[in-house]
Amino acid sequence: MDRTTRERLVARYKEGYHAVAAALEGATDADLDARPAPGKWTAREIVHHLADSEMISAVRLRRLVAEDHAEIRTYDQDEFARTLHYDRPIASSMRAFEAARLSSGELLDRLSEAEWAKTGAHPEHNPYGVERWLEIYSAHAHKHADQIKRARASAGK
């Protein structure tokens, strides 16, 4: 990955929290709990997923940077949604999501070329390194911000 692409993806990663916050602006409980289709997540569930995913991704990034040949574990996002009480208020999950993004963004700004080149193993994304991590997570929040908008739009239907 060239430096320009990397800088663009880091900027997009850092913007992710703001995209989600904008998608939630003015949301009512009815907006947050509208299920756009059977089996699809509500905006509330998406926020909790983002917090959980972001905390896991922050640890993944740190392991990739700090360890040689880090072994990255998967997790079952649907099981998290079923068992971690995704019906709760979203304020603390938004704070966790924001804090993880800010902290990881600061770390990304300080990585050396050698650290950017580090790789580990991931059962679903092999090879998996710092740059692959950035490709995935630079788009993740934006994708879910769009999903939140669609879920909220279904509230009145």
Image: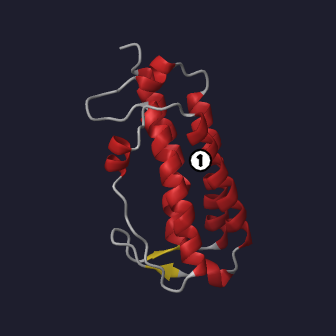
**73 or 19, nearer to the observer:** 73
Residue 70 can be seen, yes or no: yes
Circle 1 Cα neighbour tier, 10 Å, few/some/many (<14 / 14–19 / ≥20): many
**135 or 66, nearer to the observer:** 66
Is residue 139 found left or right of 16 in the rendered image? left
Q: How is the image coloured?
A: secondary structure
Residue 92 against residue 5 in the figure, above or below: above
Is residue 135 found left or right of 110 in the rendered image? left
Residue at 74% x, 71% y is 110
Q: Quadrant of the N terminus?
A: bottom right
The residue most toward the top is 156
Residue at 37% x, 43% y is 81
Q: Position of residue 48 (x, y in %)?
A: 48, 41
Residue at 60% x, 39% y is 92
- The residue that label 1 is drawn on is 97
Q: Position of residue 60 (x, y in %)?
A: 52, 68
Q: Position of residue 49 (x, y in %)?
A: 45, 45
**Amino acid type assigned to the residue bearing label 1 in the image:** Phe
Q: Quadrant of the C terminus?
A: top left
Mark 1 secondary-structure assignment? helix
Q: Position of residue 2 (x, y in %)?
A: 61, 73
Residue 29 against residue 137 in the figure, above or below: above
